[in-house]
Amino acid sequence: MPYNLEWTKAILQTAQELKSPVILGVSEGAGKYMTGYKTIVGMVNGMMEELNITVPVALHLDHGSYEGCLKCIEAGFSSVMFDGSHYPIAENVEKTSELVKSCHEKGMSIEAEVGAIGGEEDGVVGMGECADPNECKAIADLGVDFLAAGIGNIHGKYPANWPGLSFETLAAVKEKVGELPLVLHGGTGIPADQIKKAISLGVSKINVNTECQIAFAEATRKYIEEGKDLQGKGFDPRKLLAPGTEAIKATVKEKMELFGSVGKAE
Ligand code: 13P
């Protein structure tokens, strides 16, 4: 999630250092916070050039509305997710199909969603459903590049009584959609063994956000609680935001190692 310059820099530098491809996922809320999609495109493109980033980087809209996707296609993103999971399947199919055409005309990739991912994302609370494999097939057949299918995963922290991912659903979806890469949202807090099993069953994109937010907040709090902002020029935002930035780098590194993307861009 490139919420700001520090996050973007931390993610790009870590990807380059580890020779890992990376997807920068931007929610509509983050887009608004950053003053608009064009700001993000400008910052990311500029930073890639100035930092000599040579690993593959996708700039991707996360959980986009139909209108949000159109804006990102216009603004110069390289990928969008159209989240039509809250529409009846016929409407999800229709809207996804139109956006597949618009994206592919521009050489962009498009992710679609079936079966709402639970938890809270920018104020929208989903139900944490398991996707219907036949509906997944209907969306896959539209030519999307990857598919987010709900398999009991939710955004944010998992409750203590969470039963875990539904691998039966994942296997049934995979059976229907074949080679199509699957997306696992709500990467924060899923145990490593479940992540590895999901990858072995066809998941090739994993979204992680909350874990980076928590790491950033914890490191920043520590800096303030230790009174470092009161020492010398410790109040300079470049100093104040440095521990959080390092914490994001460490989190991203840990995830790239776990997901197996290290060295894939060599
Ligand atoms: P987490 O915030 O739970 O890591 O989920 C991120 C996500 O799936 C964004 O779409």
Image: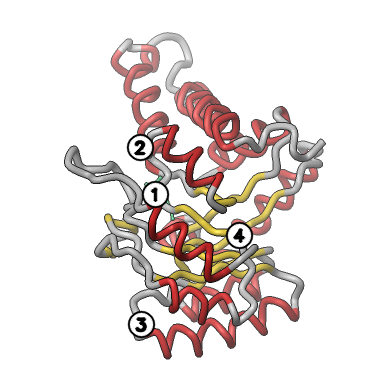
Residues under numbered marks 2 and 1 in contact, where contact means CB atoms less than 8 Å apart: yes
Under 8 Å from ligand 1: the CB of mark 1?
Answer: yes
Residues under numbered marks 4 and 3 in contact, where contact means CB atoms less than 8 Å apart: no
Q: Amino acid at mark 1?
A: Gly
Residue 207: give x, y in percent of width and height.
48, 49
Q: Is residue 205 above or below residue 61?
A: above
Residue 220: give x, y in percent of width and height.
38, 25
Q: Secondary structure at mark 3?
A: loop
Question: Label 3 belongs to which residue?
Answer: 87
Question: Label 2 belongs to which residue?
Answer: 189
Q: Residue at x 39, y 60 (%)?
A: 169
Q: Residue at x 59, y 29 (%)?
A: 257
Q: Secondary structure at mark 2?
A: loop
Q: Quadrant of residue 89?
A: bottom left
Q: Is residue 99 left or right of residue 164?
A: right
Under 8 Å from ligand 1: the CB of mark 3?
Answer: no
Q: Amino acid at mark 2?
A: Gly
Question: Label 1 belongs to which residue?
Answer: 186
**Among numbered discs 1 and 4, the one appearing first in the sequence:** 4
CA distance for labels 1 and 4: 17 Å
- The residue closer to the viewer here, 210 or 264, is 264
Question: Label 4 belongs to which residue?
Answer: 181
Q: Is residue 65 left or right of residue 22?
A: left
Q: Secondary structure at mark 1?
A: loop
